Amino acid sequence: MTVTASSFSAASSATGIAPKRFKQVFRRYPAGVVVVTADAGLGPVGFTATSLTSLSLEPPLVSFAVGTTTSSWPHIERAATAVVNFLGAEQQALATTFATSGIDRFAAPTSWRRLPEGETVLDDVAGWLRLDIEQLVPAGDHRIVIARVVDSWLDEGRSPLLFHDGAYHSI
């Protein structure tokens, strides 16, 4: 299907394009899959995200988005630190678990531990970044979290999990 400028204008309104069209456009854009975990003192929380972006090398900054209507948001809002867990190509079930509402995402079979500094990290992931949260930026129905990378670990032999057109894929 060829998308033309008129296709977009027909679906737009005074506030921008329609949510359905917005989702349709971004479903076609492949993204890496991570699980963001944090603990603001009330126990671990986590959610699946495809919004991770590197922002700066000096200092090393990343960003990710979290919806303000999600169960994780009040915890992220209060957290000083977080961990980005990079999922491997074979970890679709873990991505689905952390994308599911109304369940204990850290219950078995999820395997996790605490880093020496206290942050929650998932076991057997393809890598992780330990973050100090520096800024929360309002952005519509989400907040953009800007964080400094203070530590990392990477299993360089693993392929990443990708999300494209509503499904998980690997390279």
Image (cartoon, grey):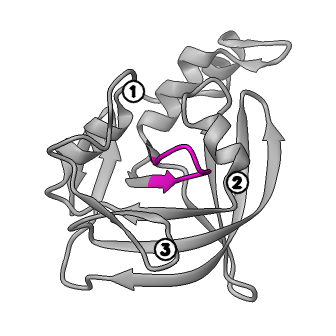
**Quarter assignment of residue 100:** top left
**Callout 1, which amino acid?**
Met
**Measuring 65% from the left and 21% from the top, which residue is drawn there?**
8
Residue 36's mark? none
Looking at the rendered image, the quarter that the N terminus falls into is top left
Mark 3: secondary structure: strand
Q: Are marks 3 and 1 in contact (CB under 8 Å)?
A: no
Image position, residue 99 (x, y; %): 37, 34
Which residue is tagged 2? 145
Image position, residue 164 (x, y; %): 33, 43
The residue carrying pointer 1 sits among few (fewer than 14), some (14 to 19) or many (20 or more) residues within 10 Å by Cα, namely few
Which residue is tagged 1? 1
**Callout 2, which amino acid?**
Val
Which residue is tagged 3? 129
| Distance between the alpha carbons at the discs numbered 3 and 1 | 39 Å
Near-viewer residue (84 or 57): 84
Residue range (magenta): 36-44
Of circles 1 and 2, which is in front?
Answer: 2
| Distance between the alpha carbons at the discs numbered 1 and 2 | 35 Å
Mark closest to the chain's N terminus, 3 or 2: 3
**Measuring 70% from the left and 54% from the top, which residue is drawn there?**
145
The residue carrying pointer 2 sits among few (fewer than 14), some (14 to 19) or many (20 or more) residues within 10 Å by Cα, namely some
**Measuring 50% from the left and 37% from the top, which residue is drawn there?**
26
Near-viewer residue (88 or 43): 43
